[in-house]
Image (tube, rainbow, N blue to C red):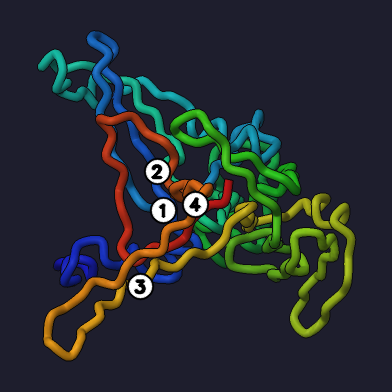
Amino acid sequence: ASGWRDKLPIPRLDETTFVHRIFGGYFRSQLKCNKCGYKSNTYDPFLDLALEISKKHIDSLISAFKEFTRREKLDIDNQWKCSGCKKNVCPTKHLSVFRPPLTLCIHLKRFGFGRDGFHGSNHFFHRSSKGLNMMGNRGSKISKRIEFPAQLSLPLSDGRVCDYTLTGIIVHVGGTATSGHYTSYVKQPGASSKLWYHMDDSFVTEVSEKTVLKQRDAYVLFYTRKEVKLEFPQPPSRERVPRNGVKEQQPESKSKGTKKEPPLDDTPQQSPNEEPPTLMFCFIRERK
């Protein structure tokens, strides 16, 4: 059966919603031929970054993101026919963030699922016999602490970085995926504000940023881009229609001594042979 996306009147119409305009970004998946150096780029939308943290060496958000974007050489079972040299090769695959979202949602994959209810033999997993009896093969939790910064510089495909500020986190308190309690920490709006609030059901408590950064069970992180403003398109010029019926174009105003610079789009710079995806009705731009 076809999905709901196949029934849309315009392909990728769902990427023009307000949810995508706030949380949506684009990945660039690049395959590079190790023989002739030819590169093939594919762009895919995303609403969040789901980062693996099960490996022992991953102890921070930075190391988790490096693992997520690590270059990988495909094996012989995943050979790819290069459009440059026309040969079947084992290319190098690299996933990176091409277009950063306004609000970056990062999901730390704390829950592992396997045959015995656990993902691997990592000693950081929280084992609960009660949870196993109830769930069968579901739901162990990785309980180790993952460090995350208040200010994040996200690397992009073209080598630049996009700066973000931490504005909220969701915390899971409990030992399994089907039990526990969720609370959140929210930063007060305003670039200069450093006030944070802990939301626990109907209880709201003011806390410090230091307390937020120490949360061991952080599950979802929200980062907001810096220096972002909204710009709306200019309306079309009006035409004067005199009484004689001859249309006269309204003269454009000319400013002397000032040179208008083109606005910087939120799409990172790319080489001429790359064609980034475009969004309809997207008027969000970035201030230099």
Which residue matches tag 1?
46
- Callout 3 secondary element: loop
Residue sitting at x 29%, y 26%: 31
Q: How dense is the environment of label 3, judged by Cα within 10 Å: few (below 14), some, or many (20 and up)?
A: few
- Callout 4 secondary element: loop
Checking the image for residue 27, the label placed there is: 2
Type of amino acid under label 3: Pro
Which residue matches tag 4?
256
Mark 4 and mark 3: Cα distance apart in space: 23 Å
Which residue matches tag 3?
235
Upstream in sequence: badge 4 or badge 2: 2
> Which picture quadrant has residue 18?
bottom left
In-front residue for pair 167/174 = 167
Q: Is residue 228 left or right of residue 212?
A: left
- Callout 2 secondary element: strand
- Callout 1 secondary element: strand
Upstream in sequence: badge 1 or badge 2: 2
Q: Is residue 115 visible?
A: no
Upstream in sequence: badge 3 or badge 1: 1
Type of amino acid under label 2: Phe
Mark 1 and mark 2: Cα distance apart in space: 7 Å
Upstream in sequence: badge 2 or badge 3: 2
Q: How dense is the environment of label 2, judged by Cα within 10 Å: few (below 14), some, or many (20 and up)?
A: many
Upstream in sequence: badge 4 or badge 1: 1
* Whole-percent x, y for residue 136 in the image: 51, 60
* Whole-percent x, y for residue 138 in the image: 52, 58
Residue sitting at x 44%, y 68%: 232
2 vs 3, front mark: 3
* Whole-percent x, y for residue 167 in the image: 70, 60
* Whole-percent x, y for residue 279 in the image: 32, 58
Type of amino acid under label 1: Phe
Do labels 3 and 1 touch, CB within 8 Å? no
